[in-house]
Every structure is written in structure tokens, then in C-alpha cells.
Image (spheres, rainbow, N blue to C red):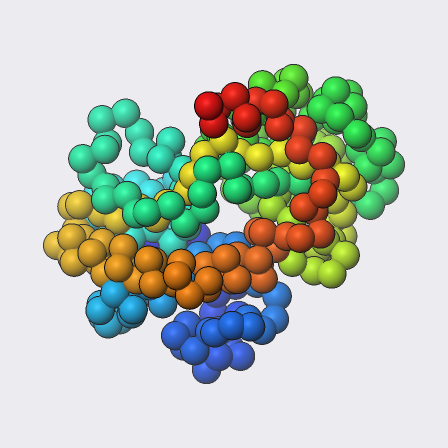
Amino acid sequence: MAVVKSDLEAYHHFLKQYNDDPLQVRQPVKGPLSRAVADMVIIAKALHLGGYDGAIDFLVTPNTKRATMEVSLGNAVIGAQQLATTAIGPGEGQLFFVSAPVTRYGEFHKVIYTTEDREDVLSAESAEDLNATGPGIIGIHWAGDEHVLNDMGISNLRTCATFESMVRMVVAGRARWIPLEASSSPDLCGFMQGTRFVPVPGVKFALPESRHFLVSRQHPAGARVFAALEKGLAKLRKQGFIRHILTASGFFNPKIASWKLLNQDALDQTRQ
């Protein structure tokens, strides 16, 4: 499994309460976890339910783009994160098996995070307000976010290669805000690199896409892993586990359900 280093560390930390065994993770899920950790648990459980019981080894990568490349080359059989199909480059379709949707179209909602002293950002009520506060920061490969934010009229964006560098940019004041999925903490806040980040209240946006796991067609075990994954994902979906663990991670968060979707009109149009 190709995985970003920080996500693998978080995965192992989360599994300490489950004797380092992802198959022991059941409803209700205990303890805080990130969406990336939830994705890895989903993969492990799906493969088991689908009849594949091989041990999972990890290929550590610096970012998700590199992880996807390792899967395309057959150096890893699967990527650790669910991704939009736009992560597959031109002419690369024959390199991947694409799983059934893990996150369905339009379900991926993001909120805007900033440090608690940025009152101008925290008072934003529209895309125009947000754009006027100063530059936002996104990952260099966050094409979906960039497209949506640009369509919303937000042109003041900067990019970084790693998540850690994005956080540092905001802390240092070189960027004002960062779009992320909602934290699973009770107050939706979180500490990143020792700094408390808080969400801009009442507003969010949706990515007009579904998200999937990518499996390598080049890896010798690719076809077998993909067949088991699809079978297991269907079972987890039926059990309600996928929705449950993604809710536990904050990815599906009832606390932001009523927040204004800044790109609602555009999302409705692309659904038609």
C-alpha cells in the first residue's frame, strides 16, 4: 500500500487501541481519527471481507501524488487514499483499476480553516469575503479544490507540495486560510504543528466529484486485490460501516450539515 508518511504514523497511532489490528475496528469507532486513517481501515477491512488475507506492507511516500505514481508503476498494489478519477493522468487509464465510489458525487464537503486570531477570515460569509482576506493555500496537486475555488471567484491562491508546508504558510502569515474537511473534534477545531486552527463558521463548499480507491493493473496481485476490494466495499456499504467511520473521522459531519454551501448552484448544474 502506497501511503504518505504522516498518514501511516497516524494510522499506527489510532490502531494502538485495537491491538494494532484494523479488523478489530467496529461500530462505534473509538477515538479521534482522520479521513486518511479511516480510508486505510476501510481498505483493510474490505480486503478481508472480500477474501484477501495477505499481509499489508507499506510503501512510504512524501505526498499523495507520489503514492499514485507508485501504484501506476506497479511498485504498490493500492493507494491508501480515496481519490477523484482526475488523479489519473491523460493516457493512464489503463494503469489502474478504479473501485466503486467510496465517497459519492458531491458528498465531499470542505470548510475553511485559519488560526484563531484571524478575525477577518473568521467573519467571512461569502467567497468574495474570503478572497478579500488574502491568499488561501492548497496542495500543488489539489486540482479539484483549485477548480471549484476559482469558479467561486476565489483567485487569490497559493500552492505547496506538502501538507506540513501548507500549515506552516498559514502559521507564518504567508497564507490566510486552508480548505480542509471538518475536524472530528467536538468544537471542529484542531491543533496542527502546535497551533490551534478553527473553522470559518457557517460556510463550506463541495467538490463536484466522487472518490475511489485506485488499484494497480501493473502489480502481479492487482486483479486479485481489486476483486476482493470491490466485494468487501459492497459488504461494508451494506453494513453502514463506510458511512459510520467517515462520520467518525469528521468527513461526514452533522455539525456542518446546515452550513451554507457556497457552490450549491454549480453543484446542482453539474448533477443535471
- Looking at this view, is 196 or 49 the one in front? 49
Q: Residue at x 77, y 39 (%)?
A: 202
Quadrant in which residue 133 is drawn: top right
Which residue occupies the extreme bottom position in the image? 19
Q: Is residue 266 left or right of residue 169?
A: left
Q: Position of residue 54 (x, y in %)?
A: 22, 70
Q: Position of residue 112 (x, y in %)?
A: 69, 38
Q: Position of residue 72 (x, y in %)?
A: 24, 41
Q: How many marks?
A: 0
Q: Residue at x 46, y 64 (%)?
A: 241
Q: Is residue 70 visible?
A: no
Q: Is residue 163 left or right of residue 54?
A: right
- Looking at this view, is 206 or 137 the one in front? 206
* Above or below, 241 relative to 204: below
Q: Is residue 123 left or right of residue 221?
A: right
* Above or below, 7 relative to 129: below
Q: Residue at x 71, y 24 (%)?
A: 127
Q: Position of residue 173 (x, y in %)?
A: 75, 35
Q: Is residue 231 visible?
A: yes
